[in-house]
Image (cartoon, rainbow, N blue to C red):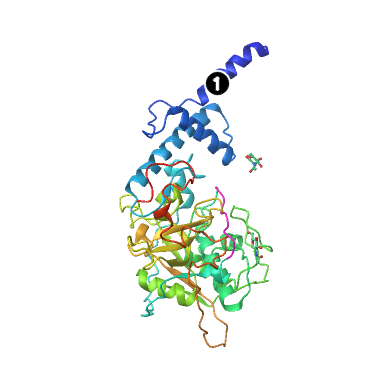
Amino acid sequence: MGPGVLSPCLLLLWAWAWALPAGSVLPPELSKAEVTRMFKDFMIQFNRTYRSPAEQRRRFGIFTQSLLAARRLQETELGTGQYGVTRFSDWTDEEFRGMFRSPPPHTMRQAPQLLRKKPPPSCDWRKAGAVTAVKDQGDKCSSCWAFAAVANIESLWNIHFHQPRNLSVQEVLDCSWCGAGCEGGYVWDAFTTVLHKRGLTSEDAYPYTGRKETCHNLNVPAAYIQGFQTLPGDEVEIAAHVASKGPITVTLNSAVMKNYQNGISQPSVMSCSPDHVDHVVLLVGYGGDGQCKVMDRRYWIIKNSWGKGWGEKGYYCLHRGSNACGITTFPVTATVHRVGAPGHNVHCPPEGGAAAAESLLTACQDPCYHQDRTNWGHGPSLGDGGK
Ligand SMILES: *[C@@H]1O[C@H](CO)[C@@H](O)[C@H](O)[C@H]1NC(C)=O
Ligand SMILES: *[C@@H]1O[C@H](CO)[C@@H](O)[C@H](O)[C@H]1NC(C)=O
């Protein structure tokens, strides 16, 4: 077969790969050419190559469905959340759920210890330097439970000992007390593992590979914990705890996070059922009390484990006060304190203010941000945000 025969064939195949699969529905405001351009931009931005034209065509169809889903979320959004193209736009919902699921937590409810203290209006542990860099669990391992637990220990260790440390998620994954791994797991299992191993190694000494491997006993702990506790499923109590003790892990429904770009996400209960939690993350602060006169813009600041390129530089802002996406279902935290030392008081810095470092996100800090800037130029505009 000479090149003269091959090229038209390839050309045809090329054209076919860029054609939408039959039955694809486009978002009404977008033309076929626009959707094709968006998919090409997506492939470049997220470095996608598909193994065959058929696969590319299938992924193009899924991409289009994600655009539609993002548009529906935008139309029913109650807060300032913006939805659109993300690194998961060519994933099916099944692939997405399969990736991040953590078994639903229905065990281990302990008698919660009520603080009965009015929480300060805002708190952002990142401003105290108590939160390590956002990590990326990768696309092949449902290890959010281990990432969130380790991030919790990192922050508490930093708050109590003023030592910033990246700790080993891989050690938790490899040595899980319950035998959990890349198929999802429980955050309390991660803490139990750390208790049994009498500490956690540093990330440098035991780096993340994104696969469950043989458990190593390096016996050089970089941090340790005294125990862990379940907190009351009440957002005021949770805020009081975060402000007075430090970041905690929570389990939530990740459904809208597939398409989330930025803003304070407040999906309808239909879009984000509080009864189907599947993803574990770290609550590092909150804000928004009384700062917006017009609207309720209270929010949680959530550290995710999908890299800095996802959401608000790796963070998610979720509405506070409505049990959005089931965030109150399973709040758990490790306990870290100096052995023999009286428990000292820690203070969470308030959010916002001129002193806010530029590396911190803007939209989470300023709840009125999106009211003045509708469709502020973040990616493709899908409907009218900033309602
Ligand atoms: C893009 O993907 C290819 C193949 O998966 C990989 O070899 C390459 O390193 C990636 N490039 C970037 C910039 O991520
Ligand atoms: C932790 O890891 C990040 C990269 O993920 C790095 O930038 C940072 O310097 C590390 N911090 C410490 C204390 O080692």
Identify the residue at horizontal 43%, vertical 42% (top origin). 381
Q: What stretch is highlighted in magenta?
A: 132-139
Q: How crowded is mark 1: few (under 14 residues within 10 Å), some or many (20 or more)?
A: some
Q: Report the residue marked by disc 1.
A: 13
Above or below, 304 against 222 in this view is above
- Between residues 30 and 3, which one lies in front from this camera angle? 30
Above or below, 231 against 135 in this view is below
Task: Estimate the x, y position of residue 211 in percent, counting from the top left.
Answer: 59, 52
- Between residues 127 and 43, which one lies in front from this camera angle? 127
Magenta segment, prevailing SS (helix, strand or loop): loop
Task: Note whether residue 231 is visible.
Answer: no
Q: Is residue 337 left or right of residue 95?
A: right
Task: Estimate the x, y position of residue 79 in percent, counting from the top left.
Answer: 36, 55
Task: Estimate the x, y position of residue 138 in percent, counting from the top left.
Answer: 57, 50
- Count how many numbered circles sit on residues in the image: 1
Mark 1 secondary-structure assignment: helix
Q: Is mark 1 within 8 Å of ligand 1?
A: no
Location of residue 213 (image quadrant): bottom right
- Between residues 79 and 131, which one lies in front from this camera angle? 79
Location of residue 275 (image quadrant): bottom left
Is 138 a magenta residue? yes
Q: Which amino acid does label 1 sit on?
A: Leu
Q: In this view, does 230 lie to the left or right of 197?
A: left
Task: Note whether residue 122 is visible.
Answer: yes
Is 133 a magenta residue? yes
Q: Is residue 270 left or right of residue 81?
A: left
Identify the residue at horizontal 44%, vertical 67% (top origin). 286
User: Where is ligand 1, by quadrant?
Assistant: top right
Q: Is residue 303 left or right of residue 2?
A: left
